[in-house]
Image (tube, rainbow, N blue to C red):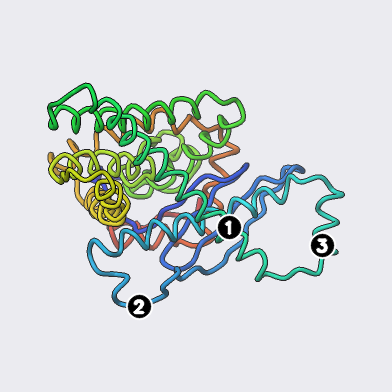
Amino acid sequence: MARRRQTQYSGIGGQAVLEGVMMKNRTKYAVAVRKPDGEIDVQVEEYKGICGDKGFAKLPLIRGTFAFIDSLVLGMRVTMHSASFYEDEEDAQEEKTEKSGGRADDIMMGVTVVISVVIAVALFMLLPFWISDLLGKYIRNASLVAILEGILRILIFVGYIVAISLMRDIKRLYMYHGAEHKCINCIERGRPLTVKDVMRSSRQHKRCGTSFLLFVVLVSVIVFFFIRVDNMALKLVLRLLLVPVIAGISYEMIRLAGRSDNIFVRVISAPGMWMQRLTTKEPDEDMVKVAIASVEAVFDWRAYLQETFGYDVDDL
């Protein structure tokens, strides 16, 4: 059976969780987790985002900020769900007997998301600015200081990714990350979603969150190079105010990358694809089965192959 090799956008995305994979299609998402007893638990829920169907949240550049916040909120939710399977039995029992409702959990999740954003901004935006400002006392060339700030931002980001990838406990998470990418690549390359076809698919994908974060760093380097002011307080305020703008631009770039495959897109996607060599690892077949279960809970890949690639897939 002849199969087209050109990548076709499917609309599905996801993330790795503890011993599992989350896949999202439109407003529905599924979390598949390999439980300690070896069985695969699949939970399907709906998430419409913090702004729901409001039109302004879908406008170009603006939608990137909301998409980023939604990814943090949903990511925290599914991570907590997957972790619940690996808590001590006593702790799990205590949680079941607690009277606190979902409202308290939502508040804690919101606080965690806010803290995560603050730490990210401080680490990747403000720390390079602070260091470059110190260097600026000895370097009088403003352009050179701006370049140094950009280089520091890139080095801090890459260093953070490298440090995380060296942690022993993170290796299995990155293997599930690879399984997630392989499933999406398998479908978007027009292959049946079988363990064999998924295993031979690439573990790098242009719409990955790693690529998005790298775009954020690179776009910030360019923006802050051309937008300069002398007042120190105004410099700091501008770096904070421009974070949503930078996120919006980066989102549009990653969105374009997921829908196109021309030479320009391949060039701008190359650094992110390289970084994914650190944030994804080759999964085993059991991990791939978990990822497949997550996909099939929210996405009819057989219908997609029929509509997009023009062939029926026999029952496998």
**Which of pointers 3 and 2 lies earlier in the amino acid sequence?**
2
**Label drawn at residue 96:** 3
Q: Which residue type does callout 2 highlight?
A: Lys
Q: Quadrant of residue 56?
A: bottom left
**Which of pointers 2 and 1 lies earlier in the amino acid sequence?**
2
Any part of residue 8 in sight: no
**Which of pointers 3 and 1 lies earlier in the amino acid sequence?**
1
Dot 2, crowdedness within 10 Å: few (<14), some or many (≥20)?
Answer: few
The reply to whether callout 3 and callout 2 are in contact (CB within 8 Å) is no
Q: Nearer the viewer, residue 215 or 177?
A: 215
**Circle 1 SS class:** helix
Q: CA distance from mark 3 to mark 2?
A: 36 Å
The reply to whether callout 2 and callout 1 are in contact (CB within 8 Å) is no
Q: CA distance from mark 3 to mark 1?
A: 17 Å
Q: Which residue type does callout 1 highlight?
A: Arg
**Label drawn at residue 129:** none
Quick one: quadrant of the N terminus?
Answer: top left
Any part of residue 85 in sight: yes
In the visual, does 256 lie left or right of 191?
left
Q: Residue at x 51, y 58 (%)?
A: 74
Q: Residue at x 48, y 40 (%)?
A: 177
User: Residue 158 placed where, x, y %?
Assistant: 37, 28
Q: Quadrant of residue 36?
A: top right
Reading the image, the residue beneath label 1 is 77
Dot 3, crowdedness within 10 Å: few (<14), some or many (≥20)?
Answer: few
Q: Residue furthest bottom?
A: 54
Q: Residue at x 77, y 43 (%)?
A: 37
User: Residue 206 placed where, x, y %?
Assistant: 30, 43
Q: Which residue type does callout 3 highlight?
A: Lys
User: Residue 287 placed where, x, y %?
Assistant: 57, 39
**Circle 2 SS class:** loop
Reading the image, the residue beneath label 2 is 54
